[in-house]
Image: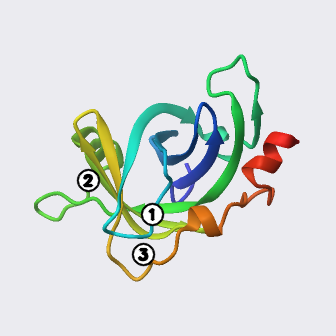
Amino acid sequence: MSPKPIFVVQLHDARRLHYDVRLEVDGVLKSWAVPRGPSLDPTVKRLAVFTTDHDLEYASYEGVIADSQYGSGAVIVWDAGVFTNLTRDDRHQPVDPAVAIERGHLKVQLHGVKLNGAWAFTRTGEDWLLVKVRDAEADPAVDLTVTEPRSVLSGLTIEEMAAS
């Protein structure tokens, strides 16, 4: 395990375009599909659908998944970095990320190329919400999904990856 756990956001053009937000927890990537991508606006709640765990090696995957396979379509690494767990219990004691996910609330500080600052994942029944915490990195005027379309690894857009 790395000194700080990693996170990755992969833009994935499968049945529909979405962002896969993945956090390293207990040696795997815990994953949420976020259809509209992360927002820097703390008033915006983004649907985040909890999906299957992925191997850590998948964090650097870019390419086109063949049509006959699950998740077929183009994938780019839209953002990547490390994160700090900010989740605390009622006594302000740290809560392990795996336990926090099981309980339905995880708060993390992202240190990425594009995404920085605190974010909260909160389970609401079957699904989750991803919300930007009000901090110095919050900026309702900026939509990184529009202004920053390129991979942090290859520099390609999702359209360029699909065409390659």
Which of the two discs, 2 and 3, sits closer to the camera? Answer: 3
The residue depicted at 66 percent of the width and 39 percent of the height is: 57
Mark yes or no: residue 79 visible.
yes
Provide residue 14's location: percent of width, then percent of height. Answer: 63, 33
Quadrant in which residue 3 is drawn? bottom right
Local secondary structure at mark 1: loop
When the figure is inspected, residue 55 is found, relative to residue 25, above or below; the finding is: above
Question: Tag 3, which secondary structure?
Answer: loop
Residue kind at label 1, given as amino acid type: Ser
Q: Report, in whole angstroms, how far the alpha carbon at label 2 lies from the one at label 3.
A: 29 Å
- On the image, numbered disc 2 is attached to which residue? 95
State left or right for residue 18 relative to residue 39: right
Identify which amino acid the numbered label 2 is placed on. Val
- 61 left or right, relative to 135: right
Residue nearest the viewer, comparing 26 with 7: 7
Residue under pointer 3 = 140
54 with respect to 49 (left or right): right
Per the rendering, the mark at residue 39 is 1
- Please determine whether, in this image, residue 35 is positioned above or below residue 83: above
**Which x, y percent locates residue 63?**
78, 39
Cβ atoms under marks 3 and 1 closer than 8 Å: no
Point out residue 19 in the picture as x, y percentages from the top left corner: 55, 47
Verify CB contact (< 8 Å) between mark 2 and mark 3: no
Residue 105 drawn at (x, y percent): 26, 50
- Classify mark 2: residues with Cα within 10 Å, few (<14), some (14-19) or many (20+): some
Q: What is the number of the mark on residue 119?
A: none
43 versus 5 height, above or below: below
Q: Separation of disc 2 and disc 1 at Cα?
A: 25 Å
Q: Earlier in the sequence, mark 3 or mark 1?
A: 1
Residue at 68% x, 51% y: name it.
77
